[in-house]
Structure formats: structure tokens, C-alpha cells
Image (cartoon, rainbow, N blue to C red):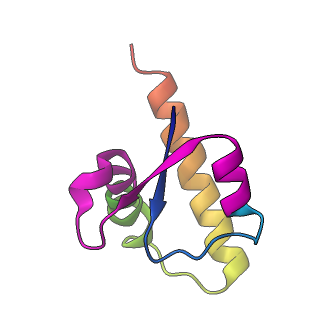
Amino acid sequence: MKLAWARMSCPPISRTCPFLIYERSVTLDFSRPGKPTDNGFVESFNGRLRDECLDTHWFLSLEDARSKIETWRRATMRAVLTVP
């Protein structure tokens, strides 16, 4: 049995999604709106992104936001990979 996370508020990506879920015997485990403890890894990442990047920069355009977020992502991954 496979387990997949999904947010209740997200619509299916396509009309074939329910058929693929059934065909591959995937059990969906929905995270409840307003319950961040349902998926701690995602909530932890979102909090870190917000604290370390989004709250510390002004974005002048979508391209500027993409550039600054990519720079933050690379620096974060470098720091994670170099931890002894």
C-alpha cells in the first residue's frame, strides 16, 4: 500500500488523477486545514523559508523574487551539506 499526502483544498491536477490513484492502489492521507502538525517537515521548511528569506528581502519583481529565493536555496543546501 502506498501513501500520499494531499491538501484538502487542492483540486486534482487532471481528470485522470483519480484513475491513477485507484489503478496504483494509492491511499491518500489528507492534511487537515489549519493543522500544521499533520506534516511537520513541510511546515518546518515553510517557516524557515519565511524567516530566513521572505521576511528579510524586498522583491521588486517576480524575476527578482526567483533570483533571491534561488540564492537562499543554494546557500541553505551548501550549509546543510557541509555540516560535519
In the image as oriented, which residue stretches furthest toward the top?
Answer: 84
Image position, residue 32 (x, y; %): 30, 66
Quadrant in which residue 23 is drawn: top right
Image: 81 above or below 64? above
Q: Which residues are magenta?
A: 18-45
39 horizontally vs 10: left or right: left
Q: Where residue 11 sits: x, y (%)?
A: 59, 76
Give residue 4's position: percent from left, percent from top.
Answer: 51, 46
Query: Residue at the spot x=66%, y=68% of the render?
Result: 66
Q: Nearer the viewer, residue 3 or 83?
A: 3
The quarter of the picture where the C terminus appears is: top left
In the picture as drawn, the residue positioned furthest to the bottom comes out as 60
Is 21 drawn above or below residue 68 in the view shown?
above
Q: Residue at coordinates 48% horizontally, 21% vertically from top-left?
A: 82
Task: Indicate whether residue 56 is drawn in magenta.
Answer: no
Looking at the picture, does residue 9 appear above or below residue 43? Answer: below
- Residue 37 at x, y = what percent? 22, 54
> Could you say which is closer to the camera, residue 78 or residue 33?
33
24 falls in the magenta region = yes
- Above/below status of 63 relative to 19: below
Q: Is 46 left, or right, of 15 in this rendering?
A: left
Residue at 39% in and 59% down:
30
Q: Quadrant of residue 70?
A: bottom right
Number of marks drawn: 0
The residue drawn where x is 75% and y is 70% is 14
